[in-house]
Amino acid sequence: MASSSASAKFLQLYESLPPDAQHALVETSLAPLLNVVPKDKSNRTLASAARMHKSYANMPSLNLKAKKMEIAALLDELARDNKRSYVKEKSRKEELLAEVIESVIDWLNDIWRVVYEYGTNFSKAHACLLYASQAVEQIGNARVGCKCSFMNMYISVKIRRSSGKVVKSFHFTGAHNLERVMLWIWRDLFVVMLADGTTRQKAAIPDMLDDIRVEFGWKALERLLYGGRKADDDEDQDEDLDFDDDIDYDDDYSEDYTDTDGSSNGTACSDAQCPCGFHASHWSNKFNDVRISLRNLIRTSLISLFSTMPSPTLFASIGDISEADGIDEDELCEDLLPTLMRVATYSSENYAAALHICALHAHPDNINSLLTSHAHLLRPRDAPAHQLATIILASNPFYQLNALRILEKELLDTAHAIRAAVRGAFCHIDVQVNKTELTEILALRQEALGRRGRIERWVGAVGAMDDADPLGYIDLEIDDPELDDLREEFRPNLKTRLDGWIAAGRTIKGGMSVLLKVYTVIIEMMPFMGVQEIVDEMTGRLADKPSKVFLCEALEVLWDFCRQQKRKFAKPKSKQRPPGAPGTSQTPGQPSNSGAVTFVTINNPRPGGGMDDVD
């Protein structure tokens, strides 16, 4: 009993040592013991070591340093070939690309054999997979002309056992899709570690998952569960990829288990006793049993990320993975919403994500709490989440009045933003002479002689400023998030923002009255919005300026909104009641063809938060 306790304590200490210290301990303390123990025991130990040596004799060598040098040499040759092609008009680019990609593919097969067949060198294999991903990226970004050859290469990958039998084959177009093969190998690496690894090896898995997340993004962790294939909502994007399976089974593979790798939906499984789809056909029962542990580790990793960088897509991904464990939407919200509300006010990104998630899952109490306390964190680009949250907020009668106030405020803010953009493009629009001229134009009838000419001269007089970004720098990298702040300043998406709030006004009860009220303010703020010819002339002057396309689009949407609201005011005279009829009252101001507005009184909110709709 004491000997057993001593050996357990020794193993615990041994596992806690760094690799170099472990080797030193074996060389200095354990190996000399073979010279003093009985000969039969030392012979058994030596025989065991010999058997282990024989089992690993044919294991591929994962020489990371040599592979780095090989890839670097091939990339250098690609660069030299690209320079020579300018003079010789002949290039070996496709041949060299095929050679370097083939080198990576062969290496991936060796990595899989080491982790799956030999069950060892997990950390080294993980480092090799990370470098393989970086190597493919380097090849794709090499300065050797266009990327057409790289993106359109036909790739065939066959993962083979040492015996030559094919375990899985992949056939697809584009070397960048090798990411899927790497994630498939990573999944096998983790299931082998969980099934056969030591405690120390298993403890390293969360750090390895973090490495994958940093390299590929967090979505790769969910894809890893499916063997690299994308989840349900991304399946359509894989239609041009052909991943064929030629499968070889382990000796203890259960005939009752049917392959679901790469084709399951995450909730249905061909194994009637299992509700998930995170299996692979070549796994033995031992490996198949630890898939749940891998799923839980990935779920934990995603939840940890969610606690610092929440997003609606990440929330949905956690939900898809949790569904396999029987966790429904209500339980998921109960688990994650407290964390979400705690970190929501840490940044504008977190705040917008929290609003969006609470809106998607209909939690008006949380929405009201966020909007009441930290609405200042909202940015114009967060309008879609803000709009959806406002609609959900209005669905609760207790918060309806607050939702209508938000709707009015945001519509007016958007109108002011458009007004500011107009002033930036037409810098003399507020000059008194031009304001007087506009008043006179608005007073003219549509068919008045010379009206069209005066409109053209007025638009020319107010002038158009030069582009703030004449070289189009902001448009060079459309998907670069680091330019979002600049785009918001120079290319604000006012069209989508205005469209969204108008749609919200038509959805919320009482919102139509707010739209009418805002319309009157817009016409007072920008009188030219009542005349289509002026709006058309202004957008025409801006149409040839790429940096002002956003303003053209916003003015078109705003004009369409004003036109629709004007129709709600102007009723045919034949349908209006006589001035002396009961229930009528004369309102000051008369409508004219110039777009002037007859102001009406919008009913005050009734007790309880409701407002009358105006059709």
Image (cartoon, rainbow, N blue to C red):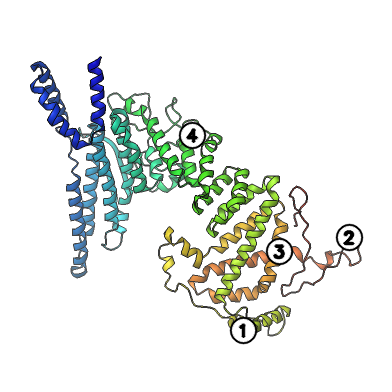
| Residue type pointed to by label 2 | Gly
Task: Tell me the CA gap for discs 3 and 4.
Answer: 47 Å
Report crowding for label 2: few under 14, some 14 to 19, many 20 or more residues within 10 A (C-alpha). few
Q: Are marks 1 and 4 in contact (CB under 8 Å)?
A: no
Exactly how many numbered labels are in the figure?
Answer: 4
Q: Earlier in the sequence, mark 3 or mark 4?
A: 4
| Residue type pointed to by label 3 | Gln
Labelled disc at residue 583: 2
Q: Where is residue 288? Give x, y as percent.
A: 35, 28
Q: Residue at x 77, y 68 (%)?
A: 598
Q: Earlier in the sequence, mark 3 or mark 2?
A: 3
Is residue 274 toward the left or the right of residue 50 in the image? Answer: right
Task: Tell me the CA gap for discs 2 and 1.
Answer: 46 Å
| Residue type pointed to by label 1 | Arg
Is residue 23 toward the left or the right of residue 491 in the image? Answer: left
Q: Nearer the viewer, residue 161 or 198?
A: 198
Task: Work out whether residue 315 can be spotted.
Answer: yes
| Residue type pointed to by label 4 | Glu
Q: Residue at x 20, y 50 (%)?
A: 68
Query: Helix or strand or loop: what does disc 3 sit on?
Result: helix
Query: Helix or strand or loop: what does disc 2 sit on?
Result: loop
Report crowding for label 3: few under 14, some 14 to 19, many 20 or more residues within 10 A (C-alpha). some
Task: Tell me the CA gap for discs 3 and 1.
Answer: 28 Å
Task: Tell me the CA gap for discs 3 and 2.
Answer: 23 Å
Residue that label 1 marks: 457
Q: Earlier in the sequence, mark 2 or mark 1?
A: 1
Residue that label 3 marks: 565
Residue that label 4 marks: 323
